[in-house]
Amino acid sequence: MIELEGVPELIDPVMVAAFEGWNDAGDAASTAVAHLDREWKGEVFAALDAEDYYDFQVNRPTVYLDGGARKITWPTTRLSVVRVGGEKPRDLVLVRGIEPSMRWRSFCNELLGFAHELGVEMVVILGALLGDTPHTRPVPVSGVTSDTDLARTMDLEETRYEGPTGIVGILQEACTHAGVPAVSLWAAVPHYVSQPPNPKATLALLNRLEDLIGLRIPQGELAEDARAWQLGVDQLAAEDTEVAEYVQSLEEARDTAELPEASGEAIAREFERYLRRRDGGPGQAPGGPGGPGGAGSHATESGDSSSFLRDAPGGRARPQKPPRGGPEADTETGTETGPDKGKGSGPDEDADTDTDRDAGRGTDAAPGKDVAPGKDAKPDSDAGRDGKDDSSED
Protein backbone atom coordinates (compact mmCIF):
# COMPACT_ATOMS: atom_id res chain seq x y z
CA MET A 1 0.00 0.00 0.00
CA ILE A 2 1.32 3.42 -0.95
CA GLU A 3 0.82 6.04 1.73
CA LEU A 4 0.94 9.65 0.60
CA GLU A 5 1.60 12.44 3.05
CA GLY A 6 1.32 16.14 2.39
CA VAL A 7 -0.70 15.74 -0.81
CA PRO A 8 -4.08 17.51 -0.69
CA GLU A 9 -7.24 15.91 -2.02
CA LEU A 10 -7.12 16.33 -5.78
CA ILE A 11 -9.83 17.61 -8.11
CA ASP A 12 -10.59 15.50 -11.23
CA PRO A 13 -6.91 14.53 -11.50
CA VAL A 14 -5.30 13.43 -14.76
CA MET A 15 -1.86 11.80 -14.75
CA VAL A 16 0.49 13.02 -17.51
CA ALA A 17 3.69 11.02 -17.96
CA ALA A 18 6.79 11.12 -20.17
CA PHE A 19 10.06 9.22 -20.05
CA GLU A 20 13.47 10.08 -21.43
CA GLY A 21 15.09 7.49 -23.65
CA TRP A 22 13.76 5.28 -26.44
CA ASN A 23 10.32 6.92 -26.46
CA ASP A 24 11.54 10.53 -26.48
CA ALA A 25 12.93 11.64 -29.86
CA GLY A 26 14.29 15.17 -29.69
CA ASP A 27 13.43 15.20 -25.95
CA ALA A 28 10.01 16.43 -27.11
CA ALA A 29 7.87 14.43 -24.65
CA SER A 30 9.95 14.89 -21.49
CA THR A 31 10.33 18.60 -22.27
CA ALA A 32 6.53 18.89 -22.54
CA VAL A 33 6.03 17.53 -19.01
CA ALA A 34 8.88 19.69 -17.73
CA HIS A 35 7.11 22.70 -19.29
CA LEU A 36 3.89 21.88 -17.43
CA ASP A 37 5.82 21.46 -14.19
CA ARG A 38 7.58 24.79 -14.66
CA GLU A 39 4.59 26.87 -15.84
CA TRP A 40 2.26 25.55 -13.13
CA LYS A 41 4.90 25.37 -10.38
CA GLY A 42 4.66 21.66 -9.68
CA GLU A 43 5.50 20.32 -6.23
CA VAL A 44 7.37 17.01 -6.16
CA PHE A 45 5.80 14.64 -3.65
CA ALA A 46 7.33 11.26 -4.52
CA ALA A 47 10.27 9.63 -6.27
CA LEU A 48 10.70 5.96 -7.12
CA ASP A 49 13.67 4.11 -5.64
CA ALA A 50 16.41 4.27 -8.26
CA GLU A 51 17.97 1.01 -7.00
CA ASP A 52 14.87 -0.92 -8.05
CA TYR A 53 14.66 0.08 -11.69
CA TYR A 54 17.90 1.51 -13.10
CA ASP A 55 21.22 0.11 -14.23
CA PHE A 56 23.64 2.82 -13.18
CA GLN A 57 26.16 1.78 -15.85
CA VAL A 58 23.50 2.61 -18.44
CA ASN A 59 21.92 5.65 -16.76
CA ARG A 60 24.70 7.09 -14.67
CA PRO A 61 24.19 9.32 -11.62
CA THR A 62 25.48 12.88 -11.88
CA VAL A 63 27.51 14.94 -9.42
CA TYR A 64 26.88 18.63 -8.82
CA LEU A 65 28.01 21.31 -6.38
CA ASP A 66 25.56 22.85 -3.94
CA GLY A 67 27.17 25.71 -2.04
CA GLY A 68 30.54 24.04 -2.31
CA ALA A 69 29.23 20.65 -1.21
CA ARG A 70 29.26 17.78 -3.71
CA LYS A 71 25.91 16.06 -4.15
CA ILE A 72 24.64 13.25 -6.35
CA THR A 73 21.47 13.12 -8.40
CA TRP A 74 20.34 9.56 -9.08
CA PRO A 75 18.43 8.65 -12.25
CA THR A 76 14.84 8.02 -11.27
CA THR A 77 11.21 8.92 -11.88
CA ARG A 78 9.56 11.70 -9.90
CA LEU A 79 5.92 12.62 -9.39
CA SER A 80 4.66 16.15 -8.86
CA VAL A 81 1.22 17.72 -8.62
CA VAL A 82 -0.05 20.97 -10.10
CA ARG A 83 -3.38 22.68 -9.61
CA VAL A 84 -4.95 24.51 -12.55
CA GLY A 85 -7.38 27.16 -11.38
CA GLY A 86 -10.37 28.77 -13.04
CA GLU A 87 -14.12 28.30 -12.96
CA LYS A 88 -13.65 24.53 -12.96
CA PRO A 89 -10.22 23.80 -11.46
CA ARG A 90 -8.60 20.43 -11.84
CA ASP A 91 -5.28 18.87 -10.89
CA LEU A 92 -2.56 17.20 -12.90
CA VAL A 93 -0.21 14.53 -11.58
CA LEU A 94 3.01 14.87 -13.57
CA VAL A 95 5.30 11.86 -13.99
CA ARG A 96 8.73 12.56 -15.44
CA GLY A 97 11.71 10.26 -15.43
CA ILE A 98 13.90 7.92 -17.45
CA GLU A 99 12.79 4.71 -19.07
CA PRO A 100 13.67 2.02 -16.50
CA SER A 101 16.38 -0.54 -17.19
CA MET A 102 14.64 -3.44 -15.42
CA ARG A 103 11.47 -4.66 -13.64
CA TRP A 104 9.08 -2.83 -15.93
CA ARG A 105 5.99 -4.55 -14.57
CA SER A 106 6.82 -3.57 -11.01
CA PHE A 107 7.59 -0.04 -12.22
CA CYS A 108 4.16 0.27 -13.85
CA ASN A 109 2.41 -1.27 -10.84
CA GLU A 110 4.03 1.29 -8.56
CA LEU A 111 2.89 4.17 -10.76
CA LEU A 112 -0.61 2.70 -10.90
CA GLY A 113 -0.56 2.46 -7.11
CA PHE A 114 -0.02 6.22 -6.95
CA ALA A 115 -2.77 6.74 -9.52
CA HIS A 116 -5.19 4.68 -7.45
CA GLU A 117 -4.38 6.46 -4.20
CA LEU A 118 -4.73 9.88 -5.83
CA GLY A 119 -8.00 9.06 -7.60
CA VAL A 120 -6.59 9.61 -11.09
CA GLU A 121 -9.36 9.52 -13.71
CA MET A 122 -7.21 9.12 -16.81
CA VAL A 123 -3.55 8.58 -17.70
CA VAL A 124 -2.03 10.41 -20.68
CA ILE A 125 1.43 9.25 -21.77
CA LEU A 126 3.49 11.43 -24.09
CA GLY A 127 5.99 10.05 -26.57
CA ALA A 128 7.99 11.14 -29.61
CA LEU A 129 9.54 9.12 -32.41
CA LEU A 130 11.50 9.73 -35.57
CA GLY A 131 9.81 9.66 -38.95
CA ASP A 132 9.86 10.75 -42.57
CA THR A 133 8.09 14.03 -41.90
CA PRO A 134 9.30 17.44 -43.13
CA HIS A 135 10.20 20.07 -40.57
CA THR A 136 8.34 22.68 -42.64
CA ARG A 137 4.92 21.16 -42.00
CA PRO A 138 2.85 20.90 -38.79
CA VAL A 139 4.10 18.12 -36.51
CA PRO A 140 1.88 15.02 -36.80
CA VAL A 141 0.56 13.94 -33.41
CA SER A 142 -1.38 10.69 -33.18
CA GLY A 143 -3.58 9.81 -30.21
CA VAL A 144 -3.96 6.09 -29.57
CA THR A 145 -5.58 3.92 -26.95
CA SER A 146 -6.28 0.26 -26.24
CA ASP A 147 -9.75 1.13 -24.93
CA THR A 148 -12.49 0.78 -27.56
CA ASP A 149 -14.93 3.03 -25.68
CA LEU A 150 -12.28 5.68 -25.13
CA ALA A 151 -11.34 5.61 -28.81
CA ARG A 152 -14.96 6.25 -29.76
CA THR A 153 -15.77 8.97 -27.23
CA MET A 154 -12.51 10.92 -27.65
CA ASP A 155 -12.03 10.44 -31.39
CA LEU A 156 -8.82 8.44 -30.94
CA GLU A 157 -7.31 5.55 -32.84
CA GLU A 158 -7.20 2.04 -31.45
CA THR A 159 -3.62 0.91 -31.46
CA ARG A 160 -2.68 -1.66 -34.11
CA TYR A 161 1.07 -1.52 -33.64
CA GLU A 162 3.03 -4.77 -33.54
CA GLY A 163 6.72 -4.94 -32.74
CA PRO A 164 9.22 -3.84 -30.08
CA THR A 165 7.82 -1.37 -27.59
CA GLY A 166 9.05 0.90 -24.82
CA ILE A 167 7.84 1.86 -21.39
CA VAL A 168 5.10 4.04 -22.94
CA GLY A 169 3.48 0.98 -24.51
CA ILE A 170 3.94 -1.15 -21.40
CA LEU A 171 2.42 1.49 -19.10
CA GLN A 172 -0.56 1.98 -21.40
CA GLU A 173 -1.30 -1.75 -21.44
CA ALA A 174 -0.87 -1.92 -17.65
CA CYS A 175 -3.45 0.86 -17.30
CA THR A 176 -5.83 -0.99 -19.61
CA HIS A 177 -5.57 -4.21 -17.60
CA ALA A 178 -6.07 -2.23 -14.37
CA GLY A 179 -9.22 -0.58 -15.73
CA VAL A 180 -7.67 2.91 -15.85
CA PRO A 181 -8.45 4.88 -19.06
CA ALA A 182 -5.16 5.58 -20.83
CA VAL A 183 -4.15 7.49 -23.95
CA SER A 184 -0.78 7.81 -25.65
CA LEU A 185 0.07 10.91 -27.69
CA TRP A 186 2.92 10.46 -30.18
CA ALA A 187 4.68 13.31 -31.99
CA ALA A 188 6.67 12.60 -35.17
CA VAL A 189 10.10 14.27 -35.24
CA PRO A 190 11.96 14.69 -38.57
CA HIS A 191 14.68 12.03 -38.60
CA TYR A 192 17.14 14.28 -40.43
CA VAL A 193 17.11 16.82 -37.59
CA SER A 194 16.72 14.58 -34.57
CA GLN A 195 19.00 16.40 -32.14
CA PRO A 196 17.27 17.88 -29.09
CA PRO A 197 15.68 20.17 -28.30
CA ASN A 198 12.72 20.20 -30.66
CA PRO A 199 10.36 22.89 -29.34
CA LYS A 200 8.05 22.54 -32.34
CA ALA A 201 7.29 18.91 -31.47
CA THR A 202 6.94 19.79 -27.78
CA LEU A 203 4.42 22.51 -28.63
CA ALA A 204 2.45 20.12 -30.85
CA LEU A 205 2.18 17.59 -28.01
CA LEU A 206 0.98 20.27 -25.59
CA ASN A 207 -1.62 21.54 -28.07
CA ARG A 208 -3.01 18.03 -28.49
CA LEU A 209 -2.97 17.48 -24.72
CA GLU A 210 -4.83 20.78 -24.31
CA ASP A 211 -7.61 19.56 -26.58
CA LEU A 212 -7.73 16.15 -24.91
CA ILE A 213 -8.08 17.20 -21.27
CA GLY A 214 -9.90 20.49 -21.82
CA LEU A 215 -7.39 22.84 -20.18
CA ARG A 216 -5.68 25.89 -21.60
CA ILE A 217 -1.93 25.36 -21.31
CA PRO A 218 0.28 28.47 -21.15
CA GLN A 219 2.86 28.33 -23.93
CA GLY A 220 5.47 30.55 -22.34
CA GLU A 221 8.37 30.95 -24.75
CA LEU A 222 7.66 27.71 -26.61
CA ALA A 223 5.95 29.34 -29.58
CA GLU A 224 8.86 31.71 -30.16
CA ASP A 225 11.36 28.89 -29.64
CA ALA A 226 9.51 26.77 -32.21
CA ARG A 227 9.66 29.58 -34.80
CA ALA A 228 13.36 30.12 -34.15
CA TRP A 229 14.01 26.38 -34.41
CA GLN A 230 12.28 26.12 -37.78
CA LEU A 231 14.06 29.19 -39.11
CA GLY A 232 17.39 27.75 -38.05
CA VAL A 233 16.71 24.38 -39.67
CA ASP A 234 15.51 26.15 -42.84
CA GLN A 235 18.80 28.00 -43.06
CA LEU A 236 20.93 24.93 -42.40
CA ALA A 237 18.99 22.76 -44.85
CA ALA A 238 19.26 25.41 -47.58
CA GLU A 239 23.03 25.17 -47.40
CA ASP A 240 22.94 21.62 -48.75
CA THR A 241 21.21 21.01 -52.10
CA GLU A 242 20.67 17.30 -51.47
CA VAL A 243 19.02 17.90 -48.11
CA ALA A 244 16.86 20.69 -49.57
CA GLU A 245 15.67 18.40 -52.38
CA TYR A 246 14.97 15.60 -49.92
CA VAL A 247 12.90 17.91 -47.73
CA GLN A 248 10.96 18.97 -50.83
CA SER A 249 10.19 15.33 -51.64
CA LEU A 250 8.88 14.81 -48.11
CA GLU A 251 6.72 17.93 -48.43
CA GLU A 252 5.20 16.69 -51.68
CA ALA A 253 4.47 13.26 -50.19
CA ARG A 254 2.93 14.83 -47.08
CA ASP A 255 0.78 17.29 -49.03
CA THR A 256 -0.46 14.56 -51.38
CA ALA A 257 -1.38 12.29 -48.47
CA GLU A 258 -3.32 15.05 -46.70
CA LEU A 259 -5.43 16.12 -49.67
CA PRO A 260 -8.23 13.63 -48.90
CA GLU A 261 -8.37 15.00 -45.35
CA ALA A 262 -9.43 18.46 -46.54
CA SER A 263 -13.09 17.63 -46.00
CA GLY A 264 -15.69 20.08 -44.74
CA GLU A 265 -15.80 18.33 -41.37
CA ALA A 266 -12.01 18.41 -40.94
CA ILE A 267 -11.83 22.09 -41.90
CA ALA A 268 -14.67 22.98 -39.51
CA ARG A 269 -12.94 21.10 -36.67
CA GLU A 270 -9.66 22.92 -37.22
CA PHE A 271 -11.45 26.28 -37.45
CA GLU A 272 -13.21 25.66 -34.13
CA ARG A 273 -9.87 24.84 -32.51
CA TYR A 274 -8.40 28.05 -33.91
CA LEU A 275 -11.28 30.14 -32.54
CA ARG A 276 -10.95 28.59 -29.08
CA ARG A 277 -7.27 29.42 -28.89
CA ARG A 278 -7.70 32.88 -30.40
CA ASP A 279 -10.35 33.76 -27.82
CA GLY A 280 -8.06 32.66 -25.02
CA GLY A 281 -10.39 29.92 -23.83
CA PRO A 282 -9.47 26.36 -23.00
CA GLY A 283 -9.79 23.45 -25.39
CA GLN A 284 -13.17 21.78 -25.22
CA ALA A 285 -13.25 19.02 -22.67
CA PRO A 286 -13.83 15.43 -23.82
CA GLY A 287 -17.40 15.45 -22.61
CA GLY A 288 -18.34 18.61 -24.55
CA PRO A 289 -18.65 22.22 -23.45
CA GLY A 290 -19.75 21.18 -20.02
CA GLY A 291 -16.63 19.11 -19.38
CA PRO A 292 -13.80 19.96 -16.98
CA GLY A 293 -11.75 23.05 -17.59
CA GLY A 294 -14.32 25.75 -18.26
CA ALA A 295 -13.62 29.09 -19.89
CA GLY A 296 -10.96 31.20 -18.31
CA SER A 297 -8.91 28.37 -16.84
CA HIS A 298 -5.46 29.53 -15.84
CA ALA A 299 -2.57 28.39 -13.75
CA THR A 300 -2.47 29.44 -10.13
CA GLU A 301 0.69 31.24 -9.10
CA SER A 302 0.77 30.19 -5.48
CA GLY A 303 3.13 27.62 -4.07
CA ASP A 304 6.86 27.15 -4.45
CA SER A 305 8.24 24.65 -6.89
CA SER A 306 10.08 21.64 -5.53
CA SER A 307 12.19 21.47 -8.63
CA PHE A 308 14.47 18.62 -9.57
CA LEU A 309 17.55 18.51 -11.74
CA ARG A 310 16.73 18.95 -15.39
CA ASP A 311 19.00 18.39 -18.34
CA ALA A 312 20.13 21.52 -20.13
CA PRO A 313 18.89 21.52 -23.72
CA GLY A 314 21.53 20.70 -26.31
CA GLY A 315 22.56 23.13 -28.97
CA ARG A 316 21.16 23.07 -32.48
CA ALA A 317 23.16 20.82 -34.78
CA ARG A 318 23.40 20.68 -38.52
CA PRO A 319 20.64 18.52 -40.07
CA GLN A 320 21.89 15.04 -40.83
CA LYS A 321 22.32 14.49 -44.53
CA PRO A 322 20.10 11.52 -45.45
CA PRO A 323 22.30 8.70 -46.80
CA ARG A 324 21.44 6.50 -49.76
CA GLY A 325 18.65 3.92 -49.79
CA GLY A 326 14.86 3.85 -49.44
CA PRO A 327 12.58 5.23 -46.70
CA GLU A 328 10.88 2.75 -44.41
CA ALA A 329 8.52 5.16 -42.72
CA ASP A 330 5.00 5.95 -43.82
CA THR A 331 5.53 8.67 -46.39
CA GLU A 332 1.85 8.67 -47.25
CA THR A 333 0.82 10.04 -43.89
CA GLY A 334 4.02 11.70 -42.79
CA THR A 335 4.17 9.41 -39.79
CA GLU A 336 6.56 6.63 -38.97
CA THR A 337 6.55 2.88 -38.62
CA GLY A 338 6.50 2.84 -34.82
CA PRO A 339 9.08 3.93 -32.25
CA ASP A 340 11.38 1.04 -33.10
CA LYS A 341 12.15 2.68 -36.43
CA GLY A 342 13.72 5.68 -34.84
CA LYS A 343 14.63 4.91 -31.31
CA GLY A 344 17.80 3.03 -30.71
CA SER A 345 17.33 0.66 -33.64
CA GLY A 346 19.50 2.25 -36.30
CA PRO A 347 22.12 0.43 -38.36
CA ASP A 348 25.06 2.27 -36.82
CA GLU A 349 26.27 -0.36 -34.43
CA ASP A 350 29.51 1.51 -33.68
CA ALA A 351 27.78 4.60 -32.33
CA ASP A 352 28.96 5.65 -28.90
CA THR A 353 25.73 5.51 -26.91
CA ASP A 354 26.58 5.70 -23.24
CA THR A 355 22.98 5.59 -22.16
CA ASP A 356 19.58 4.45 -23.31
CA ARG A 357 18.61 8.08 -23.26
CA ASP A 358 21.15 8.88 -25.95
CA ALA A 359 19.81 6.08 -28.07
CA GLY A 360 16.29 7.32 -27.47
CA ARG A 361 17.04 10.65 -29.04
CA GLY A 362 17.84 8.81 -32.18
CA THR A 363 20.99 10.75 -32.98
CA ASP A 364 22.49 7.65 -34.57
CA ALA A 365 19.35 5.67 -35.15
CA ALA A 366 17.15 7.61 -37.52
CA PRO A 367 14.59 5.70 -39.56
CA GLY A 368 15.16 6.01 -43.25
CA LYS A 369 18.86 6.66 -42.77
CA ASP A 370 19.46 4.91 -46.09
CA VAL A 371 17.10 7.22 -47.94
CA ALA A 372 18.33 8.51 -51.26
CA PRO A 373 17.97 12.29 -51.17
CA GLY A 374 16.77 14.39 -54.00
CA LYS A 375 14.09 13.94 -56.58
CA ASP A 376 14.82 10.23 -57.04
CA ALA A 377 13.60 9.49 -53.52
CA LYS A 378 9.99 8.60 -54.23
CA PRO A 379 7.68 7.49 -51.41
CA ASP A 380 7.05 3.76 -51.31
CA SER A 381 3.30 3.50 -51.28
CA ASP A 382 3.38 -0.12 -50.11
CA ALA A 383 5.65 0.73 -47.22
CA GLY A 384 3.39 3.64 -46.37
CA ARG A 385 0.32 1.47 -46.17
CA ASP A 386 2.10 -1.14 -44.08
CA GLY A 387 3.48 1.46 -41.72
CA LYS A 388 0.27 3.47 -41.24
CA ASP A 389 -0.96 1.50 -38.25
CA ASP A 390 2.54 1.17 -36.88
CA SER A 391 2.62 4.90 -36.26
CA SER A 392 -0.08 4.46 -33.70
CA GLU A 393 2.34 3.03 -31.18
CA ASP A 394 0.97 2.44 -27.78
Image (cartoon, grey):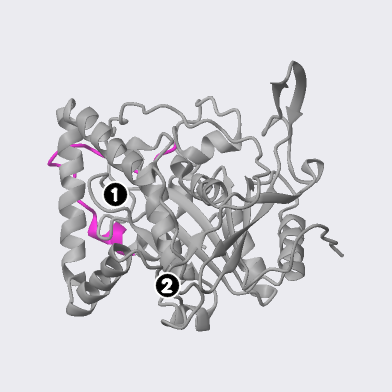
- Note whether 191 is above or below 29 in the view shown: above
Front-most of residues 180 and 269: 269
Looking at the picture, which amino acid does disc 1 mark? Thr
Q: Which residue is more in the foreground, 279 or 362? A: 279
Quick check: can you spot residue 330?
A: yes
Which of the two labelled residues, at mark 1 and mark 2, occupies the earlier sequence position?
1
Q: Look at 38% across and 44% down and name the residue there.
A: 222
Question: What is the C-alpha distance between the residues marked 1 and 2?
Answer: 34 Å
> Whole-percent x and y of residue 307?
65, 41
Q: What element carries label 1?
A: loop
Residue, far front = 302
Which residue lies under the disc numbered 2?
295
Check the image and report above or below for 244 versus 1: above
Residue 133's tag is 1
Q: Is residue 62 magenta?
A: no
- The kind of secondary structure element at disc 2 is loop
Is residue 267 rendered to the left or right of residue 117? left
Q: Where is residue 91 in the image (x, y as percent from the top left)?
A: 61, 65
Residue depth check, mark 1 versus mark 2: number of the one nearer the observer: 2
Left or right, 58 with respect to 86, comes to right
Q: Where residue 257 sits in the image (x, y, percent)?
A: 20, 62
Dominant SS type (magenta): loop
Q: Quadrant of residue 221?
A: top left
Q: Give the range drawn in magenta.
A: 365-385
- Tell me if 199 is positioned left or right of 132 in this view: right
Q: Position of 53 compared to 260: left or right? A: right
Residue 189 in sight from this viewpoint: no
What is the count of numbered marks?
2
* Residue 367 among those drawn in magenta: yes
Amino acid type shown at disc 2: Ala
- Percent coordinates x, y for residue 331 in the rendering: 26, 54
